[in-house]
Image: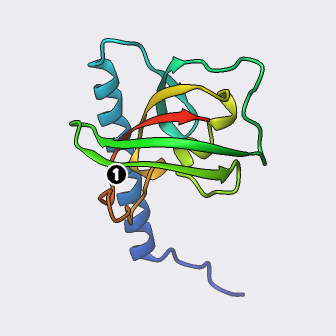
Amino acid sequence: MGQTPQADSTQLALMELNQQLTQAADEQLYRWVQEQAVPYALYERGVWAIVLNAGDSERPVSAGEECTLHMRVYSLEGHKYCDTERTTRVGKYELPAAIDANITEWHHGAQLRMAAPWYAAYGIKGTAEVPPYENVIIELEIR
């Protein structure tokens, strides 16, 4: 009979650290949301959002369709990281998970502000503009 496989201690330590970082991100965003003058709603993937303009109620965004997004990304302290516009196909994992997982909740023409945890935004690698492990504010306009 074989022995029961032993868990790799390095892997367990990394999993524990990831859980701690995730919890800290969620707590930081919760505190940030509580300080805001307007109410945010909690969406999938730990994303808090407020819809500033609901857009065209007859045209919800659907999976697989192509749409143009204007995104401005900020630190929680208000430092602007980037301001971009891009056309993308919804559901093809070309966007941060914070947007990709929730975009079909909104409509064309919608404008919203979301507070996204690092793990649903730009992750452990970040981008050229956004540092790794950075919780961010994303202002999004769906065109």
Residue 12 occupies quadrant: bottom left
Q: Is residue 135 left or right of residue 52?
A: left
Residue at left offset 70%, top offset 56%: 92
Q: State the quadrant of the N terminus.
A: bottom right
Residue at left offset 52%, top offset 51%: 96
Establish if 29 lies above or below 16.
Answer: above
Q: State the quadrant of the C terminus.
A: top right
Residue at left offset 74%, top offset 28%: 60
Q: Which residue is mark 1?
A: 21
10 or 55: nearer the eye? 55
Establish if 123 lies above or below 139.
Answer: below
Q: How is the image coloured?
A: rainbow
46 or 95: nearer the eye? 95
Q: Is residue 66 left or right of residue 103?
A: right
Q: Amino acid at mark 1?
A: Leu
User: How many badges with numbers are in the image?
Assistant: 1
Residue 109 at x, y = what percent?
61, 27
Name the element at disc 1: helix
Residue 11 at x, y = what percent?
45, 72
Residue 27 occupies quadrant: top left
Residue 24 at x, y = what percent?
31, 43
Establish if 140 lies above or below 95.
Answer: above
Residue 97 at x, y = what percent?
56, 49
What residue occupies the far bottom of the structure in this picture? Answer: 1
Instruction: Sort mark 1 into few (<14), some (14-19) or many (20+) by Cα contacts within 10 Å.
Output: some
Residue at left offset 65%, top offset 27%: 106
